[in-house]
Amino acid sequence: MDSIIVKGGKPLSGQIHIAGAKNAALALMPATLLSEEPLTLTNAPRLSDIKTMTELLQSLGAEITSMQDGKVQAMSTHGTINTTADYDIVRKMRASNLVLGPLLAREGHAVVSLPGGCAIGARPMDIHTDGLEKMGASIDLKDGYLHAKAAGGKLKGAVIDFPFASVGATENIMMAATLAKGTTVINNAAREPEIVDLATCLRRMGAQIDGDGTATITIQGVDRLGGATHPVVTDRIELGTYMLAPVIAGGEVECIGGRMDLVAAFAEKLDASGVSVTETANGLKVARKNGRPTAVDVTTEPFPGFPTDLQAQMMAMLCVAEGKSVLEEKIFENRFMHAPELVRMGAEIEVHGGTATVTGVERMKGAPVMATDLRASVSLILAGLAAEGETQVNRVYHLDRGYEHVEDKLGAVGADIKRVPGS
Ligand code: EPU
């Protein structure tokens, strides 16, 4: 497996182009199952997770052509489709569960492997399945697979109250409801920009959806959806990650394609920490206001709160900030696996349950480190940018799931970073 080697201490300067959002693309791609006509995504990110979703959709009968080095994904799902999503592909990526709603809506039945737990937490699917059951589906768990069947072969509209604003459940139910009979209302829906992006794409395909971006989404089912071409929204997590690079390493970076509305809660914390974030004609420019950033407390929340997907990266920054910060992880039960690795690099962190207390140190020290999930890996690279000496991040497999060409992007703004191919 490849590793990334970072030598710290170089201030950064220049521009980084932010890609389309992984988590938007992973929800948009299964939407192809809802229509016999072509769906084309532009501004798609070049990531291994996108390849996994491509493989899954192809196994279900979709034709997918990747163009412009992966930036354009042209998909078409006409004729008969296979309704079984196999464990061998689903286990690689939890977002595979997003084919359940579309398959059930189009074919009236589906068999989808349970994705299982993952490093950051148990991540059950009860909110998805309870919602689909309200829409008239019967769902049984047999041998690790969810066997779902719509009564009378067609889902029907329902009022669904989510106990938690789950991103994936909102996406699955929203897609399922586009072709259901009647009206579906999702209360306590997730409000993430990726939800709005999916709703926008579905509307382009002919769906009738209102309220996306608020806690109540209303979907009026239609008989069929058509084709569309849709640009994937900017990746706010990649954006936030690269915004932290000059805060940690020093210097100034302009994130091209960055939008303040995508990262408002995060930018507020940066401001409180002594970081300047300014809107430019093409994106967001970030630099420290004075010297070292200062401590700030962070609690992760569903959008529009501080995103859990930026918690690890923020922790890397707070490791070198002045003072003591408290980070509370409220979305996943086990998302501090980067903490012991950061400690190996000289950070002072204490973790108690879902709370981590970070006492900033002036300088961390490079070390060989290992990452167990995607956001953890990138936090170690960020930490390496300011550490003394060499940091070797192993198991880059995780990184490539969500960050395209990280070494090229950071290298172009002056970081000393390289990829070492695995044997
Ligand atoms: N949950 C349940 N039951 C469910 C669904 C969720 O208990 O049926 C719980 C989960 O266990 C978790 C919490 O609710 O504790 C949040 O889960 P949610 O369903 O909102 O997350 P998700 O849809 O599985 C997406 C992103 C994650 C991101 C979360 C939260 C995609 C493909 N994934 O996951 O992204 O952390 O929303 O914002 O959109 C990442 O990109 O690194 C990543 C993990």
Image (cartoon, rainbow, N blue to C red):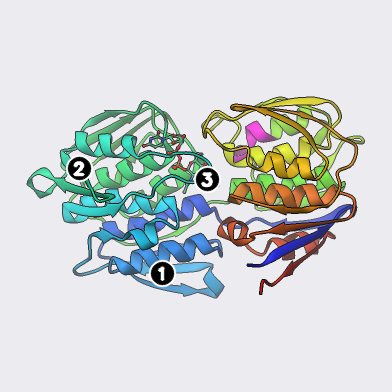
Residue of label 3: 119
Up-down: is 294 above or below 206?
Answer: above
Going by the numbered disc 2, the residue's amino acid type is Ile
Give the magenta range: 261-266
**Residue 155 placement, left or right of 246:** left
Check disc 2 and report its element: helix, strand or loop: strand
Q: Is residue 279 visible?
A: no
Check disc 3 and report its element: helix, strand or loop: loop
Determine whether label 1 and label 2 are within 8 Å by CB.
no
Residue at position x 73%, y 70% in the image: 420
Residue 265 coordinates in the image, percent (x, y):
64, 31
Going by the numbered disc 1, the residue's amino acid type is Ala
Residue at position x 43%, y 50% in the image: 94
The residue lying toward the viewer, choosing from 199 and 380, is 380
**Residue 225 placement, left or right of 181:** right
Specify the quadrant of the image occupied by residue 228.
Answer: bottom left
Quadrant position of the C terminus in the picture: bottom right
Going by the numbered disc 3, the residue's amino acid type is Ala
Residue of label 1: 74
Report, in whole angstroms, how far the alpha carbon at label 1 lies from the one at label 2.
32 Å
Mark toward the viewer: 1 or 2: 2
Specify the quadrant of the image occupied by residue 190.
Answer: top left
Q: Is-magenta flag for residue 156?
A: no
Instruction: Return the disc, 1 or 3, that comes first in the chain's sequence.
Output: 1
Report, in whole angstroms, how far the alpha carbon at label 1 lies from the one at label 3.
32 Å
- Is the C-beta of the residue carrying label 2 under 8 Å from the nearest atom of ligand 1? no
**Residue 220 placement, left or right of 98:** left
Instruction: Return the disc, 1 or 2, that comes first in the chain's sequence.
Output: 1
**Mark 1 crowd level (few <14, some 14–19, many ≥20, 10 Å Cα):** some
Residue at position x 25%, y 60% in the image: 84
Residue of label 2: 139
Residue 108 coordinates in the image, percent (x, y):
16, 52
